[in-house]
Amino acid sequence: MDGKFLGKITNCKFGLGGYQDAMLGISFTFQFDGSGIADFWGCWGDTRSEHCKWSEQERLDYLGGMCMRIAELLNQAKKSNVSELIGVPVEITISGQTLKSWRVLTEVV
């Protein structure tokens, strides 16, 4: 399955998710053409151990960047909180079984 597809956000939540639900971030589920796919923006949510290859500052920078992405997304969708993103129309780009990108269809919002 390759190409661009029109769909909508069917679920959106902020909290624990990602790898083994050990990351803090935002999860999205999309529906299109009888199929579905998901995306997660986030970083490790727990405290950093001394064996990690990333610093606490890198984690804070990533989480801050994620929050800025959420703010931009809310602005594009003309919504005030993440729960309102459910039902927002999106364009999804897929290559094989991999989600490459997605965007809010600002043209119709």
Image (cartoon, rainbow, N blue to C red):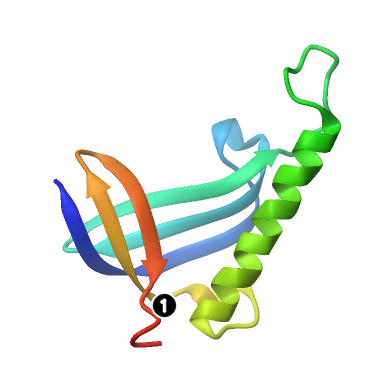
Residue 55: image quadrant is top right
Q: Is residue 12 left or right of residue 97?
A: right
Whether residue 6 is situated above or below residue 1 in the rendered picture: below
Q: Is residue 93 left or right of residue 13?
A: left
Q: Position of residue 46 (x, y in %)?
A: 79, 34
Q: Position of residue 87 (x, y in %)?
A: 40, 77
Residue type beneath disc 1: Val
Residue placed most toward the observer, 21 or 38: 38
Whether residue 22 is situated above or below residue 42 in the rendered picture: above
Q: Is residue 30 left or right of residue 81?
A: left
Q: Position of residue 53 (x, y in %)?
A: 72, 18
Residue under the point 41% across and 57% down:
29
How many marks are shown on the rendered structure? 1
> In which quadrant will I find the C terminus?
bottom left
Whether residue 30 is situated above or below residue 63 in the rendered picture: below
Which residue is label 1 attached to? 88
* Residue lying farthest to the top in this orientation: 51
Q: Position of residue 49 (x, y in %)?
A: 83, 19
Residue 102: image quadrant is bottom left
Residue under the point 58% across and 79% down:
75
Residue under the point 47% across and 57% down:
28
Residue placed most toward the observer, 97 or 83: 97
Q: How packed is label 1: few (under 14 Cα within 10 Å), some, or many (20 or more)? A: some
